[in-house]
Amino acid sequence: LTMTELAADAARLIDELADGEPVIWVGLSMGGLIGQELTIRHPEKIKGLVLANTTSGYTQAGREAIGQRIATVEAHGLSAISTSTMTRFFSEAFRQGQAATVSRHQRLLEATDPEGYTACAAAICEADFSGKLHKVRVPALVISGSLDESLPADTALALARALPGSQLVTLQGCAHLSAVEQPQAFVEVLGEFVAGL
């Protein structure tokens, strides 16, 4: 898979579901990368862009970490990375206080098709929008989690600075899956952005 193919799939889905009308794209992590590709390649389909816990491109260290996860999944399956993934996805406090939710997300990850996981992981490794974000001409909101070790606040700040006229909001006390850890705060921030369009 490539980001171009993933964005083309998203564009087809928008055509089917929105009847040709532009949409507000809300993408978290990989969904944020797809949203960037989609907005650059198919600008007529997007009227607002929300990028949560994502980046415009991974550092060499980030690509190497993803590459290691790909190799582990290919050799041993998704269960071999599921516990460490939950540690990255959720803050320690959330893992302790919301164990059932974390367990449900771990089961969802383990049920994912390994080939699909590794293909998408390889696609995000290749993504780099750092020199293209000036082409984005729609209102944008960047959301980060204050405890997101995968994509820390400075990554979100760099992304927001590269997007013309974007807003940046950091949700406190959550890690990578901010919409799961802080759903009410996430919805409020999203609602304010949508209301302003």
Image (tube, helix red, strand yellow):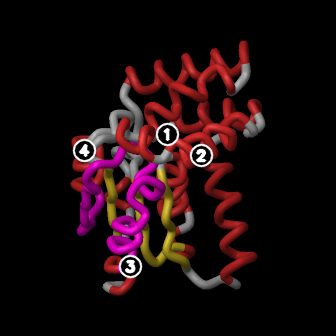
Mark 4 and mark 2 in contact (Cβ < 8 Å)? no
Asked whether 87 falls inside the magenta stretch, the response is no
How far is mark 1 from mark 3, CA to CA? 29 Å
Element on which disc 2 rests: helix
Q: Position of residue 78 (x, y in %)?
A: 69, 27
Residue at the farthest top position = 75
Mark 1 and mark 2 in contact (Cβ < 8 Å)? yes
How far is mark 3 from mark 2, CA to CA? 28 Å
Which residue lies at the image location 68% right of the left edge and 49% below the top edge? Answer: 5
Q: Position of residue 120 (x, y in %)?
A: 64, 38
Lateral position of residue 78 relative to residue 146, left or right? right
Q: Is residue 96 above or below residue 42?
A: above
Is any part of residue 138 visible from this angle?
no
In the image, what residue type sits under mark 3?
Gly
Which residue lies at the image location 51% right of the left edge and 34% below the top edge? Answer: 86
Point out the tag, 2 or 1, that comes first from the N-terminus: 2
Point out the tag, 3 or 2, that comes first from the N-terminus: 2
Residue 122, located in which quarter of the rendered image? top right
In the image, what residue type sits under mark 2?
Met
Q: Disc 1 designates what residue?
A: 127
Nearer to us of marks 3 and 2 is 3
In the image, what residue type sits under mark 4?
Ala
Q: Which mark is residue 153?
A: 4
Which residue lies at the image location 65% right of the left edge and 66% below the top edge? Answer: 11
Q: Point out the image quarter for the C terminus.
A: bottom left
Point out the tag, 2 or 4, that comes first from the N-terminus: 2
Q: Disc 2 designates what residue?
A: 3
Q: Which mark is residue 191?
A: 3
Which segment did they paint magenta?
Answer: 163-191
Is any part of residue 140 visible from this angle?
yes
